[in-house]
Amino acid sequence: MPRRKSLKERYPFYDALIQIAQYVREKKEEGNFSLASFLQDMINAIAEAEREVYLREHPENSANGFYDRNLHLTMGNLEIKVPRVRIGGSFRPALLPQRWKRVDKDYENLLLALLVNGYSRANIKRTLETLNLPYREEAIEDLTDLIYDHLDAYRTSPLPEELFAVFMDAYHGKL
């Protein structure tokens, strides 16, 4: 049986992992560790390191500060400092989602689940505020339209010929 590779053999960034593990342990011992703040720090650090690599490859360019962006995840709101370069918009950290997309798929799935389960718009807004997630009326409208499109496609689709009867049970709720 082949021997299992050590951590150092499996991860080229082993030394960085050891430092990160020590950082996490210290923060937990201090009592001020959260996964959201850790992820925020990691994304900010990796984005800045990525800019340094980019600038080494493009010596004609230079760093030009940061701009703030919020990234809304189900675990919380992350305040990201996106590094900039001076010449043009040629640099964008690979870790960040596409431009203008500041929520992840889990957020969209959460909204969809709340709508499908009959939550009112006021209840959805309260729930999202409790989770420190953004509430946009346009997102609710888009998802409502998506639900109606799926329902319409299902309603108008032909049934297979081998079906004799269809039994449906339904819950009538307001969207």
Image (cartoon, grey):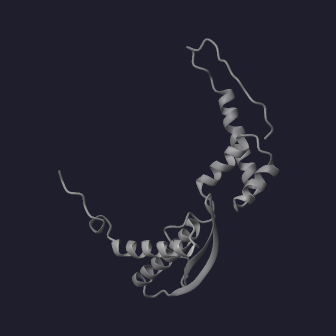
Splitting the image into 4 quarters, where does residue 59 fall?
Answer: bottom left
Q: Nearer the viewer, residue 26 or 78?
A: 26
Task: Give the image location of residue 135, x and y in percent.
Answer: 74, 58
Q: Residue at x 50, y 75 (%)?
A: 47
Could you say which quadrant of the image residue 161 lies in?
Answer: top right
Q: Residue 12: horizontal and vertical position, in percent?
A: 32, 70
Q: Is residue 164 left or right of residue 144?
A: left
Task: Residue at 62%, 23% (x, y): give it.
Answer: 158
Residue 12 visible in this rendered orientation of the protein: yes
Determine the residue positioned at 70% across, 23% down. 169
Q: What residue is shown at x 71% (from left), y 45% (from top)? A: 114
Percent of width and height locating residue 78: 62, 68
Front residue of this view, candidates 90 and 5? 5
Residue 175 in picture, x, y percent from top left: 78, 41
Q: Residue furthest top?
A: 164
As drawn, is 159 to the left or to the right of 12? right
